Image (cartoon, rainbow, N blue to C red):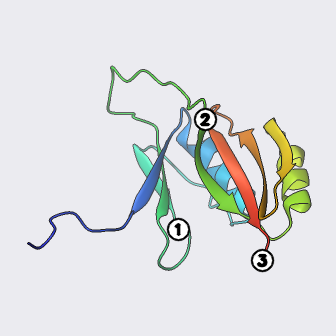
Amino acid sequence: MKPTIHNRIDTVFIHVRNLKESVRWYSTLFGLEFQEGEYEGPIYTIDMGADRPGLTLDNHCFDKDYDFKPSNHPIFNVSTDDINAAYEHIKNMGAEIVTEIETFPDLADFSFKDPDGNIIMVCTCFT
């Protein structure tokens, strides 16, 4: 039987309050150029690279009854080659650190909050 659902993730949704400021913040996080302009919504997708899921910011501007609740656990992780430099970058952006750098035999990670309180994890793997 041929599956009706493809074995892949196309995008990850992050629920935000202010789409333009979230696009600016995530652009800074990933070192991407921010394009001034209107960001009315309801969504904006950040290209995360070839063969990678997009990161879709969603402000629910057409959903009048939407009740925004940030995640209280990491909703995804991003990778880094230098966990200490990533930690400093995120601290310099003013993000709230949720967990300090933890080092394990095969990886190190930490978590922080985006401006809307969603928790994101940063990881580096040791090979």
The mark lying in front, picked from 2 and 1, is 2
Q: Is residue 61 left or right of residue 69?
A: left
Label 3 to label 1: alpha-carbon separation: 27 Å
Name the amino acid, label 3. Thr
**Looking at the image, which is closer to me, 93 or 70?**
70
Name the amino acid, label 1. Asp
Q: Which mark is residue 127?
A: 3
Q: Is label 3 in a helix, a strand or a loop?
A: loop
Q: Which residue is located at x 65 percent, y 31 percent?
A: 117
The tag earlier along the polypeptide, 3 or 1, is 1
**Residue 73: horizontal and vertical position, in percent?**
60, 35
Instruction: Give the labeled residue for mark 2.
Output: 73
Instruction: Give the labeled residue for mark 1.
Output: 47
Q: Which residue is located at x 62 percent, y 32 percent?
A: 116
**Looking at the image, which is closer to me, 13 or 62?**
13
**Residue 118: horizontal and vertical position, in percent?**
61, 36
Label 2 to label 1: alpha-carbon separation: 23 Å
**Residue 46: horizontal and vertical position, in percent?**
53, 61
Q: Work out which quarter of the rendered image holds the C terminus and state it.
A: bottom right
The tag earlier along the polypeptide, 2 or 3, is 2
In the rendered image, the vertical position of residue 81 relative to residue 114, given as above or below:
below
Q: Is label 2 in a helix, a strand or a loop?
A: loop
Q: Work out which quarter of the rendered image holds the N terminus and state it.
A: bottom left
Q: Is residue 89 left or right of residue 39?
A: right
The tag earlier along the polypeptide, 2 or 1, is 1
